[in-house]
């Protein structure tokens, strides 16, 4: 009888894609979606914050205590893996560049294979297990040097997959019934810079495939050029962009070693919003030097931005980064209060945005992704959640809604 393997994935969309790659190479074992039934647990870790490290370590220890064989991989492999191995809380550790060898590795114990951060796997997935939308990795690594960020140290320099490989991957997924793809990577906007290609050219080619909608992972403001802005009128593109600002005060952006500045961010977001787009961002509060005066100015600037979605963070010290050595730290309670201020602001913006769509008679184009609590769940073209009540099986369907109700947490329709 084959041993059962359960995958636990922490972190970003790129990690979700990496887990699918490992699944594709699992030949002599049986995959299970049940943690309880698993003999082996593969932990695909994230190390973007201290909380991410803690969560991965705690999960590894918990599974070990339940007598599971635990294998540790992902962004935390180099940083956290060796100590877990020495403490015999995991059976083996391997970096990103060994994930295609997983079938062999799960038959071994006591190894530590460091991530050299040079590989770019060429696995073609024939399906995205359990999903109606698929993540497609188009590049790996990051050449930015933001002072707070450890990711370039664990993912390496930016390197792009060939466009022909990506299009072949998307064709395979389309044949398997996938309707939406999310282009992902460590720094998506840098795709093609090392190959004389560009993200805009790639999206135009994807539009020639059966895929109905393309969503793009996080973009840097400096990466959105005139060629990309022309894409905003293309029907293949989801009407939502995630543009990582990180802050709304130039003093903080300089301390963070960011390439963007507040006045150009405002102009860019206004241009994107004028095309009817929902806009999300990443934002860090509590970074060293964020005093009260700076914060109040930043908050005033923030409130002027047409943001509808946000992924906010409280600054987390990452050893080995320039920010970790900076003085003028911000009290944790103050940082939490600032986090809630911007979250509440964007929540109000999002509700007003959805109400405006309803008032304008905009139809919602929804990909149904799951079923929970008696309702079908999906997202519209603006990346807003939609709940559907129907006697008909809507699983994996593409639904267009003209009659719907705007609620605080999601839009709702009864079919």
Image: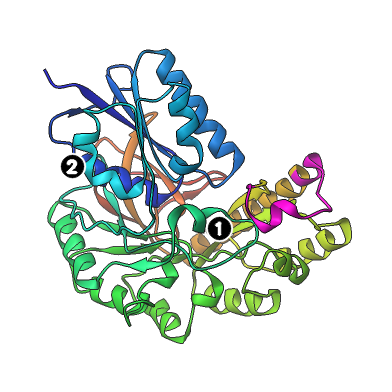
Considering only vertical position in the picture, is 58 above or below 240? above
Classify the position of the C terminus by image quarter. Answer: top left
Res. 148 image quadrant: bottom right
Residues drawn in magenta: 318-335
Q: Which mark is residue 25?
A: 2
Any part of residue 376 in sight: no
Q: Which mark is residue 279?
A: none
**Does the segment drawn in magenta span residue 28?**
no
Considering only vertical position in the picture, is 357 above or below 128? below
Residue 389's spot in the image, x, y percent? 35, 38
The residue located at (41%, 18%) in the rendering is 64
- Disc 1 is placed on an element classified as helix
Q: Nearer the viewer, residue 35 or 412?
A: 35
The residue located at (64%, 55%) in the rendering is 321
The residue located at (48%, 82%) in the rendering is 225
Q: CA distance from mark 1 to mark 2?
A: 46 Å
What residue did someone put label 1 on? 355
- Disc 2 is placed on an element classified as loop
In the rendered view, how is the structure colored?
rainbow
Residue 194's spot in the image, x, y percent? 36, 76
Any part of residue 411 in sight: yes
Farthest residue, direction top: 66
Q: Mark 1: few, some, or many residues within 10 Å (few <14, many ≥20)?
A: some
Classify the position of the N terminus by image quarter. Answer: top left
Tell which circle, 1 or 2, labels the residue nearer the N-terminal end.
2
């Amino acid at each position: 009888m084959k041993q059962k393997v359960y995958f636990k994935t922490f972190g970003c969309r790129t990690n979700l894609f990496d887990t699918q790659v490992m699944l594709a190479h699992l030949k002599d074992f049986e995959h299970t979606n049940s943690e309880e039934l698993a003999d082996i647990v593969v932990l695909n870790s994230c190390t973007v914050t201290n909380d991410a490290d803690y969560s991965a370590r705690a999960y590894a220890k918990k599974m070990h205590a339940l007598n599971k064989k635990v294998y540790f991989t992902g962004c935390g492999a180099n940083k956290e893996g060796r100590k877990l191995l020495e403490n015999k809380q995991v059976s083996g550790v391997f970096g990103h560049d060994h994930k295609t060898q997983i079938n062999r590795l799960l038959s071994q114990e006591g190894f530590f294979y460091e991530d050299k951060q040079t590989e770019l796997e060429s696995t073609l997935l024939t399906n995205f297990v359990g999903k109606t939308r698929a993540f497609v990795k188009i590049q790996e690594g990051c050449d930015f040097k933001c002072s707070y960020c450890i990711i370039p140290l664990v993912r390496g320099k930016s390197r792009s997959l060939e466009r022909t490989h990506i299009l072949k991957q998307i064709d395979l997924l389309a044949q398997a019934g996938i309707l939406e793809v999310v282009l992902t990577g460590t720094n998506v906007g840098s795709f093609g810079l090392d190959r004389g290609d560009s993200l805009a050219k790639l999206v135009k080619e994807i539009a020639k495939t059966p895929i109905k909608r393309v969503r793009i992972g996080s973009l840097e403001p400096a990466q959105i050029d005139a060629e990309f802005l022309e894409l905003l009128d293309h029907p293949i593109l989801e009407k939502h962009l995630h543009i990582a600002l990180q802050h709304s005060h130039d003093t903080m952006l300089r301390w963070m070693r960011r390439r963007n500045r507040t006045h150009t961010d405002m102009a860019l977001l206004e241009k994107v919003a004028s095309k009817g787009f929902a806009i999300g961002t990443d934002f860090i509060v509590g970074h060293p030097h964020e005093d009260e005066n700076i914060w109040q100015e930043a908050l005033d600037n923030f409130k002027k931005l047409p943001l509808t979605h946000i992924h906010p963070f409280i600054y987390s010290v990452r050893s080995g980064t320039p920010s970790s050595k900076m003085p003028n730290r911000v009290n944790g309670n103050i940082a939490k209060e600032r986090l809630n201020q911007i979250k509440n602001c964007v929540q109000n913006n999002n509700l007003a945005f959805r109400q405006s769509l309803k008032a304008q008679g905009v139809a919602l184009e929804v990909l149904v992704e799951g079923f929970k609590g008696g309702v079908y769940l999906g997202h519209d073209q603006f990346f807003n959640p939609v709940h559907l009540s129907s006697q008909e099986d809507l699983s994996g369907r593409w639904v267009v809604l003209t009659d719907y109700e705007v609620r605080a947490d999601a839009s709702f329709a009864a079919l």
